[in-house]
Amino acid sequence: MERLRYRFITGPDDAEFCRRISALLGEGYVLHGSPALTYDGERVIAGQALILPSDAD
């Protein structure tokens, strides 16, 4: 299965979100830009873009 070159991961700002980002970093993705944070009235929601570098970059 072909991996996506761009991913935007969102979810509650908790340990599971950090594990998801860490797993993608372990697969070769790199962070792209700063994280985004918002509050939905109950909890903080985080978002982080990641890119998969190519040999052409």
Image (cartoon, rainbow, N blue to C red):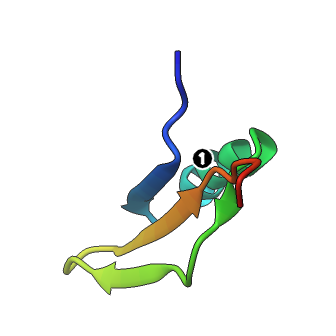
Quadrant of the rendering where the C terminus is positioned: bottom right
Residue 19 vertical placement versus 27 (above, below) = below
Helix, strand or loop at label 1? It is helix
Direction from residue 40 to residue 56 in the image, left or right: right
Residue 22 in picture, x, y percent from top left? 72, 51
Q: 15 and 30: which one is in front?
A: 30
Could one spot residue 13 in this view of the protein? no
Callout 1 environment at 10 Å: few (<14), some (14 to 19), or many (20+)? some
Residue 13 in picture, x, y percent from top left? 49, 68
Name the residue furthest front. Answer: 56
Q: 54 and 18: which one is in front?
A: 54
Q: Which residue is mark 1?
A: 20
**Residue beneath the point at 43% across and 71% down:** 46
Direction from residue 31 to residue 1 in the image, left or right: left
What residue type is disc 1 on?
Arg
**Residue beneath the point at 59% across and 72% down:** 32
> How many labels, in total?
1
**Residue beneath the point at 58% across and 57% down:** 51
Q: 6 and 9: which one is in front?
A: 6
Could one spot residue 24 in this view of the protein? yes
Residue 1 in picture, x, y percent from top left? 52, 15
Name the residue furthest top. Answer: 1
**Residue beneath the point at 63% across and 54% down:** 21
Residue 19 vertical placement versus 11 (above, below) = above
Name the residue furthest left. Answer: 41
